[in-house]
Image: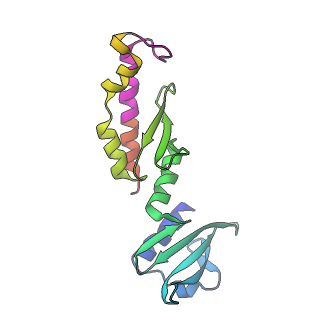
Amino acid sequence: MDKYLKRLCKAILADRFKEKNYRMRRSYYGCDIVTNPVFSTSYDLIGFSASVYDESGLHYCDVRYDWDLNELMIDEMDYRDYFNLRYLDECGIWKTNGEDEFSCYTPNGDEEMFIRLEKPRKKYLQEYIDNFDIDYNVSIWWPNGQKGSGVPFDNMKEHYEDYEEYLKNLQEICDGMPY
């Protein structure tokens, strides 16, 4: 479904999607769409909304495009954030209850990491990766070079290697993010 949704978003942004042709439910590259005009409070036409249905005919999501603001939203979320969140979730990074917080486990699976991002975008994940201080994070677990309580590793070297692999995996995820 996401590939159809991406195709729809690209067409809308490139002004190739003729929303008036979809006022009645009909197929758009494998999924059904129904559009409705969107008016401002002064009853000026400012854009349209589209209900998108999956192959089985079930409602999948709502897309809204505001011509005045040049704003494309999927289920009340910026389309870039929508696709990035779906991608991050597929990669094992999930959104926590916090507004801008994500969570995942290090490669050994022993440590849950919390990632704060201003928005779920490639730019912000790259900043997190670039600013991650392995020495500082290891020192929290190994005060004065001695194993602290609850340390999931037998030695500091394993802990460093786990963080290095964590950052390598995050970089691959970041490189694969659509926006």
User: Is 111 contained in the magenta span?
Assistant: no
Q: Quadrant of the C terminus?
A: bottom left
Instruction: Using residue 158 as the reference point, say whether residue 7 is left or right of it.
Output: right
Q: Quadrant of the N terminus?
A: bottom right
Q: Residue at x 46, y 48 (%)?
A: 100
Within the image, what quadrant is residue 10 found in? bottom left
Instruction: Using residue 138 as the reference point, say whether residue 55 is left or right of it.
Output: right
Task: Return the residue nearer the eye: 100 or 168.
Answer: 100
Q: Residue at x 31, y 30 (%)?
A: 133
The answer to whether 163 is drawn above or below residue 117 in the figure is above
Q: Residue at x 39, y 30 (%)?
A: 165
What is the residue that sits farthest to the bottom in this orientation?
A: 43
* Horizontal and vertical percent position of residue 168: 36, 35
Q: How is the image coloured?
A: rainbow
* Horizontal and vertical percent position of residue 170: 40, 39
What is the residue that sits farthest to the top in this orientation?
A: 146
The answer to whether 87 is drawn above or below residue 112 in the figure is below
What is the residue that sits farthest to the front in this orientation?
A: 41
Instruction: Using residue 6 as the reference point, say whether residue 168 is left or right of it.
Output: left
The magenta-colored residue range is 147-167
* Horizontal and vertical percent position of residue 176: 40, 49
Q: Residue at x 45, y 76 (%)?
A: 12
The answer to whether 179 is drawn above or below residue 20 in the figure is above
The answer to whether 79 is drawn above or below residue 37 in the figure is above
* Horizontal and vertical percent position of residue 132: 33, 35
User: Is 165 contained in the magenta span?
Assistant: yes
Task: Return the residue nearer the eye: 147 or 49.
Answer: 147
